[in-house]
């Protein structure tokens, strides 16, 4: 049976142009959040454990077999949270060495409290950080994070990352019935975080669950 590739696309993205996606977990849906609007339907493994899920060698093999030359950027996202991959910085380094293309990372921001994760992310040219709530109750209802991750720890992680990161930082906000009343609070948080860009998104379909 052939293995599922860790590389997909390129696909056209309104945010970054032609983007080749790389999935560093690729084994299951693995994330430290279980967002109500998640397009994966259900996160099978909710964890904050960082480990090597897919070897760097396998990712690079898949890259070489792909149409990477047609892409403007290489994007770490996929069916899970890329900062949970312990080999993320090794992969970013190899991607840049082999392709000379900019690397974008989409993260849920939950692991940014960890200095090691922030250091690894600094190798990317662009980082998109998720922030969907302006108070703890909404954070719990929307993102349903693994134990130990709170809105405060997430915001503090983004704030520290902003101080250390010289690349282009975007904050991504998914507008939902659960958080759309928090415009002023979001504005205050964004002033504190000083991203280069704010991306307002709407879910393409109604969230599947709000309370499990
Ligand atoms: S952070 Fe992304 S992958 Fe994780 S549950 Fe939320 S939407 Fe799904």
Image: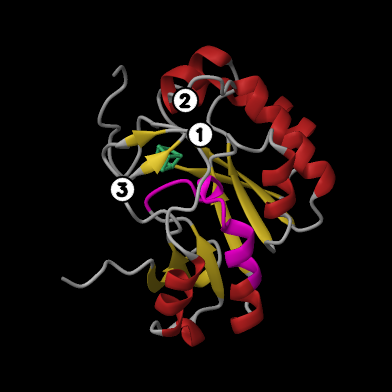
Q: Name the disc covering residue 48, or none.
A: 1
Quadrant containing the C terminus in the rendered view: top left
- Mark 2 touching mark 1, by CB under 8 A? yes
Q: CA distance from mark 3 to mark 2?
A: 17 Å
Q: Name the disc covering residue 164, or none.
A: none
The span shown in magenta is 79-93
Quadrant containing the N terminus in the rendered view: bottom left
Q: Nearer the viewer, residue 145 or 28?
A: 28
Is residue 55 found left or right of 191 in the rendered image? left
Element at badge 1? loop
- Please give the residue where the numbered disc 2 appears in the rendered image: 146
Ligand 1 rendered quadrant: top left
Counting from the top left corner in percent of width and height, residue 114 is at: 69, 36
- Please give the residue where the numbered disc 3 appears in the rendered image: 28
Is residue 85 found left or right of 27 in the rendered image? right
First in residue order: circle 2 vs circle 1: 1
Confirm whether residue 28 shows in the render: yes
Q: Is residue 197 above or below residue 208?
A: below
Rendered residue at 56%/51% (across/down): 86
- Magenta span: predominant SS is helix
Element at badge 2? loop
Counting from the top left corner in percent of width and height, residue 156 is at: 72, 28
Q: CA distance from mark 1 to mark 3?
A: 14 Å
Counting from the top left corner in percent of width and height, residue 17 is at: 52, 71
């Amino acid at each position: 049976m052939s293995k599922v590739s860790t590389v997909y696309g390129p696909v056209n993205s309104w945010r970054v142009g032609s983007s080749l996606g790389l999935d560093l977990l690729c084994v299951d849906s693995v994330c430290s959040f279980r967002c109500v609007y998640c397009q994966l339907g259900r996160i099978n493994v909710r964890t904050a454990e960082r480990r090597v899920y897919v070897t760097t060698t396998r990712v690079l093999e898949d890259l070489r077999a792909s149409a990477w030359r047609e892409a403007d950027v290489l994007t770490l996202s996929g069916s899970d949270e890329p900062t949970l991959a312990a080999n993320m910085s090794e992969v970013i380094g190899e991607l840049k060495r082999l392709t000379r293309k900019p690397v974008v990372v989409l993260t849920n921001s939950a692991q940014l409290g960890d200095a090691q994760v922030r250091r690894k992310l600094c190798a990317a040219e662009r980082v998109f950080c998720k922030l969907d709530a302006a108070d703890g109750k909404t954070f719990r209802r929307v993102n349903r994070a693994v134990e130990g991750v709170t809105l405060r720890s997430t915001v503090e992680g983004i704030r520290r990352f902003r101080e250390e990161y010289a690349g282009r930082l975007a904050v991504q906000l998914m507008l939902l019935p659960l958080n759309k009343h928090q415009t002023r609070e979001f504005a205050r948080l964004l002033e504190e975080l000083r991203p280069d860009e704010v991306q307002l998104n709407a879910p393409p379909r109604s969230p599947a669950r709000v309370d499990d």
